[in-house]
Structures are given as structure tokens and as C-alpha cells.
Image (cartoon, rainbow, N blue to C red):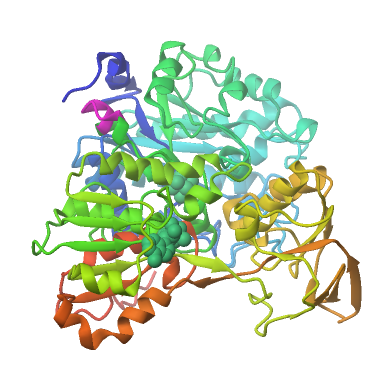
Amino acid sequence: MSRDTYYDILFKPIQIGPVTAKNRFFQVPHCTGLGYRDPTANAWLRGVKAQGGWGTVCTEQVEIHHTSDITPFIELRIWDDRDVPMLAQMAEKIHEHDALAGIELAYNGLNGPNLYGREVPLAPTGMPVQSFTYDPVSAKTMDRQDIRNLRKWHRDAAIRGKNAGYDLVYVYAGHGLGFFHHFLSKRYNRRSDEYGGNLENRIRILKEIIIDTKEAVGDECAVPCRITINELMGKAGLETQEAMDIVSSLAELPDLWDFCLAGWENDSQTSRFSQEGFQDEYRKGFKALTTKPVVGVGRYTSPDKMVSLIKSGEIDLIGCARPSIADPFLPRKIEEGRVEDIRECIGCNICVSGDFTMSPIRCTQNPSMGEEWRKGWHPEYINKNVSSKPVLIVGAGPAGLEAAQMLGKRGYDVTLAEKELNLGGRVSRESKLPGLAAWGRVVDYRLSQFNKLPNVETYLDSDLTLDHLLEFGIPLIGICTGSTWYKNGLGFNLKEPLDIDPGASVYSPDDIMAENLPNGSHVLIWDDDHYYMGNVLAELLIQRGYEVSYTTPAPEVATWTQNTMEQHRIQKQIMELGVTIHSNLILTSIAEGTAKLNCSYTGKEQNFEMDSILLVTSRYPNDSLFRGIMEKEGEWQDHGLEMVKSFGDCEAPATIAHAVYAGRRFAEELEVKPSKEEIVPFKREIAELRYVSD
Ligand code: ADP
Ligand code: SF4
């Protein structure tokens, strides 16, 4: 099939300075958690995006000089010529598929505590570094020589970027992370020389750097400028008018404008707090300030929306980070007339959590993300079946859906049995909770694929027992029957079940999701899970008219969501809803109408009156079916069973992303024998020990 002509505009080439992008799909720079530690995995990841049809594919931040590193975060580096091969490999992988390669040069300055290089950080004005980790380090105020040095470093890095084969060499003033943003902002720039004070002065360094970069590489490479158009902090930060003045005064200087919000948590908002296109309103009026092409983001996954953005003249290139992570083949699917196959980003920011935990990127929707080289997984293709043996998958949650889909693609005849009347398991339940509707796409995408796979049969209302498994005699069985929330307090803090009075009204998230709502009007939540469930249920209970008190052993609500950049928004939201928050408390006992909690520091006991308590702590695997069949291993042969494996929450409860990954892994590895020499089941970049004297 070929594309609908309505989408032709998305495939119209566009000139960017001296280079031409073959289409309007632009993978803006985004982190991967791979960086300099896993450069080959990183190169393969970018190469697969190019293979999927993105006309331009960019790197993450590439630190230009050893005087600014953002350790412990793992980005790329172009400190000297020895970094060039690592970056060249990535450009080559991108070029293999006729895409442009972009490199985002970054000097973090005030955002880098320099924990690796131990150099004193540089900033327009000396002040404590603005890191994510409150490092007790200050930056020094740059003098004129420092500024001259910086210009040279940036110029050298630009030349190295060109030599590494890049077609676009970025000047990065976005997100409040790009150093040039700090000069633009009155908050960070309190200088009184020609680089501070009025706007003209604050723009000076950015202008000089764009000119320097163009002089250095502009005959061969385009020079885009990624710039903050709003910091969403009112007068304290950059606002629309000031940003417009900046863009106007530099209007024709860069070859491309890449508009973003600052900080990163505003630019990459989750679907709980914003919809597709949430940046459109902030970008209004900016494009008219320049004749140069403009790229903008907004978690765009709808091809129709993309067309309307270009037709209405809002932007020229569709900028995507997360939609390209969830579906590296999004452009090709539009081109091939398969828009229904697009695996839409759900806006959960699990991808961001990879960067925040310094681990390789992962994605809820696309389990192959980050594994393209490490495991040889591909977002679209999978090895053919080894045999024609049928497979039974028990449980159609995210793990089961992914396994069935990918085994179907391998060519196996798959029976997917689900005890409920609908597919999706926890995703179906959780996507009905406040703010989580977009998560339903995890199910929607996989169901859309089943329609194309006649060899996958789904059976609803099928609560399988041990006898069924034996009777069916299907040789290959995957069991992914999910998990259940504890109702006895076991979790991160409590390793012994709580002392609970039988008269107490105690609920778990499963109860609430099953509409078994709490007794009385006042609910006390104890959240020892620290992700979304406790706070989403607080919101739901408020909507249902309850008075809600929220307690947690952590110092803040949903502390793990620091990794998805949602913590601040979540805490604000439930405070504004009227939930009272009590931190640093360990639950010790529950009686009728009251619970005792101890201060986690002093042990001082507090009584909380309530009508009901909702325990959001942890889950146990629903593994009785799996354990049962394993106990009957001696009878398998008589019934034709050969292999049974559990995976997903039924093996060990974790995030939805973990379950999808586990389903993919089951499908990838079924009947595939590991090679004899394999000890570690994924490729690693092993450092070659070499003493290099400078
Ligand atoms: P995961 O995240 O690991 O996929 P879920 O809890 O989302 O786990 O999904 C597990 C699914 O398995 C649920 O939809 C549940 O109804 C189903 N299930 C559990 N036990 C059985 C069983 N014995 N037979 C068929 N389906 C089952
Ligand atoms: Fe989208 Fe979530 Fe995947 Fe990130 S992890 S790309 S937010 S689906």
C-alpha cells in the first residue's frame, strides 16, 4: 500500500541551510541513558530511527568540553578528537538510511557540578549549580577570558562535529540546561558588562556563538538553534514577549529554529498533565519572526495533526522525541499507508526514567528501545519461528498481549486465554483511573495487530486451571497471570504483615479499581509504593466525595516520579485537591477507626482517625497456576507439554514497561538456544585498557 495523498506534505523535502531534509519528520535531540558508556547501542538506536523514515535524526546532548560535565547523567562527549570515532559511528548509522544526522553541542555550565572532571563550573554569574541533585557546588562568574575560551571550545567542537559527519550542528540554548539560556535569563545573568543587563547584552554570547559556528561549519552543515520560548514561571523566568524579542533579533542567523519549553519537565510533560499539542499555544507568533524553517514538539502521534501543523504554517518540521521512541517506524507507517499500525506514545515518561537512573533507555510501548544492538531486537521485525508447535499464553495483560503479538509475528499458532471479559489486564483497569486514559494505547496497539494475525486466537472469559493446561496438551506455555496488591502492609518498609484489627476497614488498590469503595467518608492512604497508584487513587477518592489524608514513609508524595519528572506536578495537584499530606511516617498498626504511624526519624507515635484505610504498598505474584504446573512436571510428557515459563508480574511485579519487556523477551527467546559461549545475554561495550598520555 502507498500513502494517502493527504499526507504528502509530510514527505516534502525541505532545505535547512546548506542541507536538505528528505521529509518533515525530525527526531529532535533526546537523551538515551546510553551516551558515552554505550556508544554502539546508541548508534544502532539512532540508525533504527533513520530506517523507520525519520528524515533527520539527532544525538542527545554532546558535552563539548571537560570543564562542563553533568555526571552522574550519561550523555555524549566531544572533548577532543578521540571522541570523534564514537560520534562518527552514529552519524554513519543514520546516513545508511538517507537521513540527516544532527549533533547537539552542549555546554551545561551552571547545570553541571563537574563531578567527573572536578573543574570549577562556569556561569554568567557565580551561584550554586542548578543540578537535579542539589549538589553543594557553586559555579564561578566567567570573566572575559573565560568567554573567549568558551567561544573557542564551541568552535572546536563544531569542527569536530562536522568531521564526525554530522549535517546539522546545534547551538543549544534550550530547557534551561543549555548554557546560553543562562546568559539570556535575568535570573541567572546578573552581569554588568557587555554580556549582562539589557536584552541586547544578554543575547550577545548566543549571537557570537551562532556566528562562530556558522563560520566554522556553515558551508557544509546547517546550524540550528534550540531555544527556550517560555519557562512557565511567570516573571521569574523567560516569558513569551522576551523570548520573541530574542528570536526577532537573531531571526535569520541560524538555519533552523527549534523551539522548546524550559525546563525539561515542562517540555516533556506526561499525558497525566497535558495533551498532544500542548506546546502549540506557547509557540504562537514565533514562526512569523523568521523566514528560517521551524521545528516544534508536543508529543505528536497523529498524522492528521502533523499535517494541520504544517498546512496552517505553525511549524515546518514535526519535532518528536517520545513519539519516535515509542515508534521508530512512525514515518514509514504513514508512507506505506499503515497509520493504524502506529504505536502511539502513551506519555508515561518511563523513557525519561532511564536517563534519571543512568540506565539504558526503556519504553513502555516499544520494548526494543535501547535493545537494538544489545539484544538485536527490532521495533518491527522478529526472527521466524523455530518449529510449528502451538503456544498457549495464559493471561492477557501487557505481558501476555506483547508475547502473543510477537509470537504471532514469528509465525507461531498462539492461543491467548484470559479469564476476564476484556483483554488488557492491569492496563485496562488502570487506564480508567484519573489522568491515565492514554495508557490504554498499550492495549489498543496490540489489539490492532491481532486483527492482522490470523494465527493468534484470543479466548475471553477463560479462567484456566491446572487441569486445562494438562488437557489442552499445548507443548509451549507462557503464564503471565499478573499480580495482586497486598492488604497487609508488606512492601518497601514493612517485611512482616501488619497488626490489623478485624473490625478495621482496609482496602487495596484492587478493591478501589473493582469499585469496592471505602466505608465512611474519611480515607487514610498509606503509600509505600511511591509511584502513581497512591496519588491517582487519592484523586479518584476526592472526585468521589471522600475526605482524604495521605501518609507515606518518604519525604514527599510519589518520590519515584522524580524519575518521570512528575513529582512536583503530582504533589501540587493533590494538595490543590485538598488532600492533607503527612510525610516520613511508618504504619505500625490498624484498628477500627484509627491507625498508628511512627515518625521514621524519631519513632514518635501518631494516631490518625479515619473511617477506612487504603494500603498502597506492593503486589504479590498470581503464580499458583505456574507453581502448580511446575509441581506436575512428571506428568507433562503424557500430556504433550514441553516447556512452561512464567513472566511479567506473575514472575515478579513491576511496571507496565517491565511486563511488556518480559512479554517481548519470552517471544524472542522461545525455542531459541543461547549460544554456548553466551554468559551475559546482551552485548556490552567493553573498555579497551589503554594508557593515553596527553
Ligand atoms: P502483566 O502486567 O504481567 O501482564 P496483568 O495483571 O496485567 O499482568 O495481567 C494478567 C492477566 O492474566 C489478567 O488479565 C488476568 O485476568 C489474567 N489471568 C489471571 N489468571 C488467569 C487464569 N488462570 N486464566 C486466564 N487468565 C488469567
Ligand atoms: Fe512514550 Fe512512555 Fe515510551 Fe516514553 S516510555 S516514549 S513516554 S510510551
Looking at the image, how many numbered discs can be counted on the residues?
A: 0
Is residue 98 toward the left or the right of residue 421 in the image? Answer: left
Q: Foreground: 383 or 256? A: 383
Q: Position of residue 385 (x, y in %)?
A: 12, 59
Most distant residue in the bottom direction: 634
Is residue 483 toward the left or the right of residue 184 in the image? Answer: left
Q: Position of residue 116 (x, y in %)?
A: 54, 68
Quarter of the rendering occupied by the C terminus:
bottom left
Residue 367, located in which quarter of the rendered image? Answer: bottom left
Q: Is residue 515 visible?
A: yes
Residue 557, located in which quarter of the rendered image? Answer: bottom right
Most distant residue in the left direction: 387
Q: Is residue 360 visible?
A: no
Q: Position of residue 269 (x, y in %)?
A: 58, 40
Residue 335 drawn above or below residue 441: above
Residue 232 drawn above or below residue 493: above
Residue found 73% across the figure and 80% down from its top: 498
Residue 234: within the magenta?
Answer: no
Is residue 84 toward the left or the right of residue 146 in the image? Answer: left
Is residue 535 toward the left or the right of residue 370 in the image? Answer: right
Residue 40 drawn above or below residue 566: below
Q: Foreground: 82 or 381? A: 381
Quarter of the rendering occupied by the N terminus:
top left
Residue 589 drawn above or below residue 262: below
Query: Which stretch is magenta?
Result: 333-339
Q: Which quadrant does ligand 1 occupy?
A: bottom left
Q: Foreground: 426 or 552? A: 426
Q: Position of residue 628 (x, y in %)?
A: 36, 80
Residue found 8% across the figure and 61% down from its top: 388
